[in-house]
Image (tube, rainbow, N blue to C red):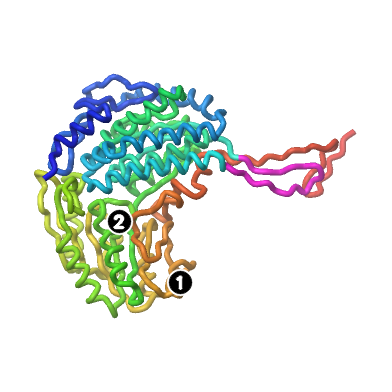
Amino acid sequence: MADIKKIRNDAFKALGLTQENSGVYNGKWVEYNKENALDSISPIDGTLLGSVSTASPNDYDKSIKIIEKAFLEWSVTPAPTRGNIIRKISRSLEEQKANLGKIVSLEAGKVISEGEGEIQEMIDVGYFASGLSRQLYGSMMVSERPLHRLYDQYVPLGPIGIISAFNFPTAVWSWNSLIAAVTGDTSIWKPSSKGSLAAVAVMKVIAKVIEEESVPPIFALVNGRGSKIGELMISDKRLKLISFTGSVKTGKRISTVVSGRLGRTLLELGGNNCAIVSEKADMNMALKGVAFGALATTGQRCTSTRRIVVNSKIYDEFLSKLISIYKTTQIGNPLDKGILVGPLIDNNAISNYEQAIQTAINQGGKILYGGKVLSREKGYYVQPTLIEAREDMYITMEETFAPILYVFKYNTMLEAMKIHNDVPQGLASAIFTNDLKEEEYFLSARGSDCGIANINTSTAGAEIGGAFGGEKDTGGGRESGSDAWKLYMRRQTVTKNYGDDVPLSQGVTFDID
């Protein structure tokens, strides 16, 4: 069995962490203050990993002023130069990938490959952003007026705020901050209180690059409770954009507050992701894709598969094989080899798991496998659960951050798509089929209403090159790849007149002597 304390101590030494860590960085680390400090507790076995101090209102205000000033310099730095700095950050993260991955695994309860995979995601985003720094293109348009040039350009937006969640305590920050940095923005980050140590570890690595390269303090870190620091951020007009990952309820409040000051929001909220399994699917591929989607990160991904809709012709066979996979999946310390399912994040998550299962039973659901709590004292472990569901079960309309998978049966694609789309959320979706017509139907206007649509692969595991986000109650945000960079910039239409007269558009005349 993995020695958690040794793993922690080795990673702490390599990263410069201690038992008591400052949680505030704004170009320099603010002195640790034990008042209101956050304890980082590993969900693996309840070990106290360390503590992280929180930002006071004064710390927050000072940090905002620092990144405001840094923006003035950073925004006029050539974009390729900004890209070079981000590339160096990626290299530094690469050097510490194993140690940072261990901190993520310890604090979030992820298996080792997922912990390191999250750091790899940050590295990849950095390299993507570095290349993007030479591709911040505008569009040239044809002017209707003689001797005129008309085009779009994108201008840095300003300081932005990032509020991230516990399940990806570092990667989601990079989706925003590193992309925003190459566009010329600065940022301030409030991580989840359950991911405070991972955030400090990442900033320790990045701060060295910033200081060695004499870069202005473009990144700030302010640990704290959402009710305090989060509230300051969303109401702060100095932050031109707030990126929030979390619950629908909190996201709606943030949207209301930020839009009230005419600021921008980027919202990544709830996911209730569904996979359709056709009788024309490769069953082995479908089983692997569904199992990974439902079990990875113990069902605590935004893109976790929470519902499957299986064709009636293969329903019994597919469910029999899926149950066999569930029975043989190893649950336990995610630092041990062979473990695929680790703990839930805390005792409250176990309570939500229990409540959802009982509600499902009360509404007519049938447990096919699982449903039991394995431990809630020395780590937070539960059985992954399969529940045969009906369309009138309202619990299936909700997102429960736990390994609960609701199973439906269908006869026609029309039925399948109705079940698939008939939920408030619209993040990730999947269909397993080798039928071209079914694929195209799934991708048509009558098909998946989600921001992410997958063919023959899991709802979970999105690549950084694509824009990540969803529709409906998921919030409509788009992060990371594709042209998501445009959200962090001001779009400006430029008209240049290089003639000797001032002709007007639409044939308007305005003659003066």
Q: Position of residue 418 (x, y in %)?
A: 38, 70
**Residue at the disc numbered 1:** 441
Residue that sits furthest to the right in the current view: 513
Q: Which element is circle 2 on? A: loop
Let me know if residue 141 is in the magenta part.
yes
Q: Nearer the viewer, residue 291 or 156?
A: 291
Residue 194 placement: quadrant: top left
Q: Left or right: where does residue 375 sit relative to residue 359?
A: left
Q: What label does residue 188 carry, if any? A: none
Q: Amino acid at mark 1?
A: Tyr
Asked if disc 1 and disc 2 are in contact, CB closer than 8 Å, the reply is no
Binning the other alpha carbons within 10 Å of mark 2 as few (below 14), some (14 to 19) or many (20 upward) gives many
Let me know if residue 333 is in the magenta part.
no
Q: Which element is circle 1 on? A: helix
Q: How many marks?
A: 2
Q: Position of residue 248 (x, y in %)?
A: 35, 49
Q: Is residue 361 visible?
A: yes
**Residue at the disc numbered 2:** 304
Which residue is drawn at the image coordinates 35% and 59% (left, top)? Answer: 459
Residue that sits furthest to the top in the current view: 31
Q: Please state the extent of the stretch shown in magenta in the rendering.
A: 136-153
Query: Which of the image's four quarters has the C terminus?
Result: top right
